[in-house]
Amino acid sequence: MIRRAPSLQHQAVAASVLRLRRLGIDTYQESIAYIRSDSPVCKAEGFEARSRLVLRCGERRIVATLNVVHFALIDMDEIGLSEAAWAALGQADGQLVQVGHAPAVESFSAVRGKIYGRPFGNEAIIAIINDIAAGAYSDIELATLITACSGSRLDLAETAALTMAMVNAGQRLEWDAPVVADKHCIGGLPGNRTTLLLVPIVAACGLLIPKTSSRAITSPAGTADTMETLAPVELTARQMHRVVEQEGGCIAWGGAVSLSPVDDLLIRVERPLGLDSDGLLVASILSKKASAGATHVLIDMPVGRTAKVRSPEAAAILAARLVEVARSLGMALRVQMSDGVQPVGRGIGPALEALDVLAVLQNHSEAPDDLRQRALALAAGLLELAGKASQGAGMAMAAAALDSGAAWRKFQAICAAQGGMREPPRAAFTQPLCALHAGTVMAIDNRLLARAAKLAGAPKTPAAGMVFHAPLGTVVAVGQPLFTLHAGSPGELAYALAYAQAQDNLVTIGDPG
């Protein structure tokens, strides 16, 4: 138990000095501070709700947004901190902290200019990114920046400058190899867990592939979530180097090594806004790849009505920008378009996707062939791009690594090096959703499927999600399962089932004739 210092309530409180208190409030990555409205400091400094505060404790300094408290959640001599602010400041409960108004953010004037049509200059972009990295931008200011950059408002030069500034604002990994391979999927396709297959395939073929992956934000599983059901993923930069030097590859969570941290801050605000921007997307992807030290990058771009990229025309525009910005960074990049009309494999959710991956790696006869073929095509493209295989010979090389068991052995070795391989968990509760009439599966809404899997508890409950039984073209009879929901509790299972039953176009079944 942490013992608090004696209260200052009956002492003269020095202006702008308060005691820290951890409130345990999760505000995700946003630093929030809480002060009583009747606090002498709040009155003396003229603090109001949404004021930007600077908190100083010794050499540590953070900027936080103020929420004013009108009841006794905290004492008058205290300043409460959200979990994000607490972690950033790194002090003990009861520690004295100086509190003052944060200075105006000068770089924001360039954001205002962008709103009125003035292009960003390189120096302005660098100043903006550095200020964001320092925590100087509030969520409102971040939302304004994202809006100013939405649509096609960032040109090629601005996108390249933004990408480089984001790289320079974080840690950058370096590798003792002339070729460092990497892969990224644009996303929007449930179950598309090809990274866990591609990495061991190309590593078994002799390419260096230090793969950093993300956790889910709006999807039922991120690559790091799925990998975590099989092995630890929260590796430090030093641990990543050790694993890669030993095995030629790794699959780690990028958030643990602070690669392009500004990207994470932008994504946190960008996702709820639902704004599309090719420029921000390109900067997000390539800043992470450049920070990871990649020299050759393959992009998987699923295209489909309910995928993230919905038309061939939009895909071509995005692909061209990715290639051009990568070239400006000295990086070789190839985009492979793929079918984005339906889920990949059977599992949707961390553990269920991991089981699909294991089945493919172990060459089980019942392994999902669509996941296998997609992973082989991507591995082949990366092997050819990186010069490990000649053009047209990558597929044979990738298939040989998988069929011979070399990829499975490499995956086991990577898991062992990352801290030990484990069995994916199994859900305690399952329930199928069955066809109400006979016919042929004509259409699938990826977004609705993902939503149902999330309502079942994925990815927070690693075993939760769904197993999908009815890909396009499947002929189904009345009462035949379309998918089976997996959940950690009866309540989540019932809620997800009710949601799925209410969606007429989740799986569209046409007339059998």
Image (cartoon, rainbow, N blue to C red):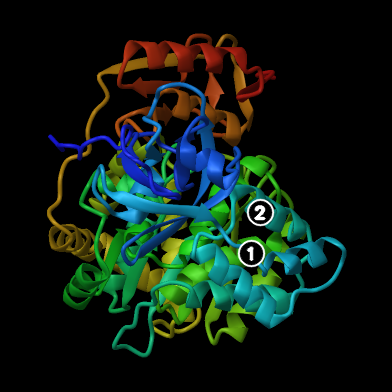
User: Where residue 510 appears, x then y in whole percent?
Assistant: 68, 21
Residue sitting at x 39%, y 25% = 73
Q: Looking at this view, is 402 or 318 the one in front?
A: 318
Q: How many marks?
A: 2
Disc 1 designates what residue? 105
- The dot on residue 30 is none
- Side of 15 relative to 357 (left or right): right
> Does residue 378 sit above or below 512 in this rendering?
below
Whether residue 268 is visible to the viewer of this picture, yes or no, is yes
> Does residue 380 sit above or below 491 in this rendering?
below
Q: Are the two marked residues, 2 and 1, in contact with CB atoms closer than 8 angstroms?
A: yes
> Does residue 6 sit above or below 508 in this rendering?
below
Q: Amino acid type of disc 2?
A: Glu
Kindly report the distance in space between the C-alpha atoms of the residues bearing marks 2 and 1. 10 Å
Residue sitting at x 30%, y 68% = 400
Quadrant for the N terminus in the image:
top left
Disc 2 designates what residue? 141
Label 2: which secondary element: helix
Residue sitting at x 62%, y 85% = 328
Quadrant for the C terminus in the image:
top right
Q: Looking at this view, is 487 or 283 the one in front?
A: 283
Task: Say whether disc 2 or disc 1 marks the residue closer to the N-terminus.
Answer: 1
